[in-house]
Image: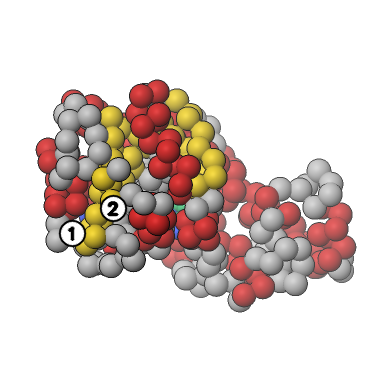
Amino acid sequence: MKIGFIGLGNMGAPMAANLAKAGHDVTGFDTAGVSVEGVTKAETATDAVGGAEAVITMLPNGDILRAVADQIIPHMEKGAVFIDCSTVDVDSARAMADQAEQAGLLAVDAPVSGGIGGAAAGTLTFMAGGSDAAFAEAAPLFDIMGQKAVHCGAAGAGQAAKICNNMILGVTMIATCEAFALADKLGLDRQKMFDVVSTSSGYSWSMNAYCPAPGVGPQSPADNGYKPGFAAELMLKDLRLSQQAAESADADTPMGQIATALYEQFVEAEDGKGMDFSAMLPRFEKRGRS
Ligand code: NAD
């Protein structure tokens, strides 16, 4: 298959490389002039999409996606599928789908979970929104870049699933970190805390798979000086998207709102920038009640 790939950053580069490795003819473009092994480098976004049966974007945010969509959609082949894997707001995902469908294209919003490690290993999870026909067209590519793809519903449903998932993740990570900090102050050994909670009703992915306490539980960024991993600023981005969606859908999300405010403070007013999102634990350790 001839594939255009736009946005060859931390995630996009390994995803494009995996498609090329699987034998697809991949042409890539990134404004930073990135080269990826096995991927033909295009000089412009429109050069990357000409003649492609599938175009994949992996970009920083919704505004950039909208700008790139305006640029490339008129140059895409009728019937081709436009797959956006970036994490963006639901409204931008729906706008992209409308614009693509009006131009005679198929469209899928397909944000991912699994991070840079999953992108490199080809083990991402895709959560997809779009028509059955569009999903069917994209599915073989998801199989190469990932281990699971869930068709969540119509356009925007993939982004909706992603931001709801990450709102839970932000909230459970904060809860896990504040509980560890409280346990410390109560004199409870961290290993004992992990042994109990990871097998009791307080368990979660944040505790069991990504434990924020160094030396406890499985290997995680906590064991590597809280180097990301999943950066606190990316968590803040996703939490803000969840609150933007909650606002436009008139949904009451008090925990999501508090998690957003805490990550905002951590990233913008404290020392969270450049740290993994689990570095909330050393943040809470340093603090008292007031
Ligand atoms: P990144 O910043 O490493 O990559 C984005 C790339 O897009 C950059 O290389 C940049 O030069 C390029 N770019 C920006 N504007 C462009 C344009 N107009 N045309 C072409 N290229 C352009 O970011 P990333 O970590 O690869 O993340 C990409 C997306 O995936 C984001 O939406 C992010 O939220 C999401 N995501 C990231 C992770 C993660 O762990 N990094 C996990 C899941 C989802």
| Viewer-nearest residue: 76 or 252 | 76
Residue 41 makes an appearance in the image? yes
Instruction: Return the x and y of residue 39 as percentages of the image width and height.
Output: 29, 60
Quadrant in the picture for the C terminus: bottom right
| Nearer mark to the viewer, of 2 and 1 | 2
Residue 62 makes an appearance in the image? no
**Residue 58 bears which disc, if any?**
none
- Is residue 71 left or right of 128 when viewed as pictured? left
Q: In the picture shown, does residue 187 fall above or below 178?
A: below
Mark 1 sits near ligand 1, with its Cβ under 8 Å away: no
The residue at 44%/65% (across/down) is 268
| Viewer-nearest residue: 142 or 207 | 142
Q: Where is ligand 1, by quadrant?
A: bottom left
Tell me which colouring the rendered structure shows.
Answer: secondary structure
Instruction: Return the x and y of residue 207 as percentages of the image width and height.
Output: 72, 55
Amino acid type for the residue under numbered disc 2: Val
Q: Badge 2: few (under 14), some or many (20 or more) residues near its Cα, within 10 Å?
A: many
Identify the element where label 1 is drawn. loop
Which of the 4 quarters of the picture holds residue 37? bottom left
Question: Counting residues from the N terminus, which is met first, the one under dot 2 or under dot 1?
Answer: 2
Identify the element where label 2 is drawn. strand
Q: How many marks?
A: 2
Which of the 4 quarters of the picture holds residue 92? top left
Quadrant in the picture for the N terminus: top left
List the residue tagged with mark 2: 26
The residue at 48%/30% (across/down) is 151
Q: Badge 1: few (under 14), some or many (20 or more) residues near its Cα, within 10 Å?
A: many
Q: In the picture shown, does residue 258 fall above or below 188?
A: above
